[in-house]
């Protein structure tokens, strides 16, 4: 079978590209973090401020900490016997007497900001939360980015509701 010069170059480029991609492992050098790596969660969270491991009222693992001076909790869900959790939710509360809990201001926040959700809890305090999934694992870089987003969310919320 004869190929024209153009066909040969295209075939060569296609094969080189395909072979080059096939030779690279899917996660070359990428550390995957799962729920079994709670020490990594704690290490990464510690890079943003204070953090301590705890358990919630149902006995599931959780973290409590401070970022940018704001207290938060990280709760885990989708757990089986207090292990193998597959998603989490960050929660921070702001005193309803010091921060706006007006429905229009909350709606404006929820419609303006892409990440984070605002609501008022049963005590009249402002609640900000941010959920994320990690079922099957997530790269260390992506998890660190998720924690960075949480810090941004809390700072934006604090400024928005003051």
Image (tube, helix red, strand yellow):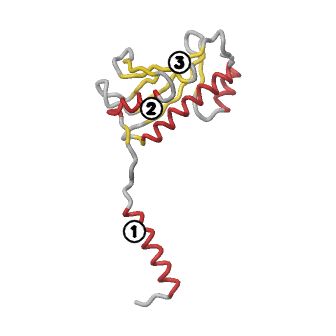
Q: Quadrant of the C terminus?
A: top right
Q: Position of residue 150 (x, y in %)?
A: 54, 30
In the picture provided, is 63 more to the left or to the right than 111? left
Q: Position of residue 29 (x, y in %)?
A: 39, 50
In the picture provided, is 85 more to the left or to the right than 14? left
For discs 1 and 2, the disc positioned in front in the rendered view: 2
Residue 10 is tagged as none
Q: Which residue is mark 3?
A: 71
Q: Which residue is mark 1?
A: 19
Q: Which residue is mark 2?
A: 44
Label 1 secondary element = helix
Which one is earlier in the sequence, the residue at label 3 or at label 1? 1
Residue drawn at 51 percent across, 22 percent down:
91
**In which quarter of the view is residue 70 placed?**
top right
Mark 1 vs mark 2, CA separation in Å: 36 Å
Residue drawn at 48 percent across, 30 percent down:
47
**In which quarter of the view is residue 18 placed?**
bottom left
Q: Position of residue 23 (x, y in %)?
A: 37, 63
**In which quarter of the view is residue 95 placed?**
top right
Residue drawn at 59 percent across, 25 percent down:
154
Relative to 26, is 114 above or below? above
Which one is earlier in the sequence, the residue at label 2 or at label 3? 2
Mark 2 vs mark 3, CA separation in Å: 16 Å
**In the depicted view, which residue is nearer to us: 130 or 65?**
65
Crowd class of label 3 (few under 14; some 14 to 19; many from 20; radius 10 Å)? some
In the picture provided, is 97 more to the left or to the right than 76? right
Label 2 secondary element = helix
Which one is earlier in the sequence, the residue at label 1 or at label 2? 1
Relative to 57, is 133 above or below? below
């Amino acid at each position: 079978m004869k190929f024209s010069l153009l066909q040969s170059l295209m075939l060569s480029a296609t094969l080189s590209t395909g072979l080059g991609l096939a030779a690279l492992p899917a996660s070359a050098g990428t550390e995957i973090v799962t729920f079994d790596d709670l020490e990594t969660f704690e290490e990464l969270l510690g890079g943003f401020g204070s953090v301590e491991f705890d358990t919630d009222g149902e006995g599931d693992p959780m973290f409590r900490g401070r970022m940018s001076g704001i207290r938060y909790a990280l709760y885990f869900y989708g757990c089986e016997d207090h292990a193998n959790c597959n998603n989490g939710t960050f929660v921070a509360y702001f005193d309803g007497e010091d921060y706006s809990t007006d429905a229009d201001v909350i709606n404006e926040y929820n419609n303006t900001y892409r990440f984070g959700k605002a609501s008022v809890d049963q005590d009249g305090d402002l609640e900000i939360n941010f959920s994320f999934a990690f079922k099957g694992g997530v790269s260390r870089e992506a998890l660190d980015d998720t924690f960075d987003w949480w810090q941004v969310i809390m700072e934006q919320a604090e400024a928005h509701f003051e």
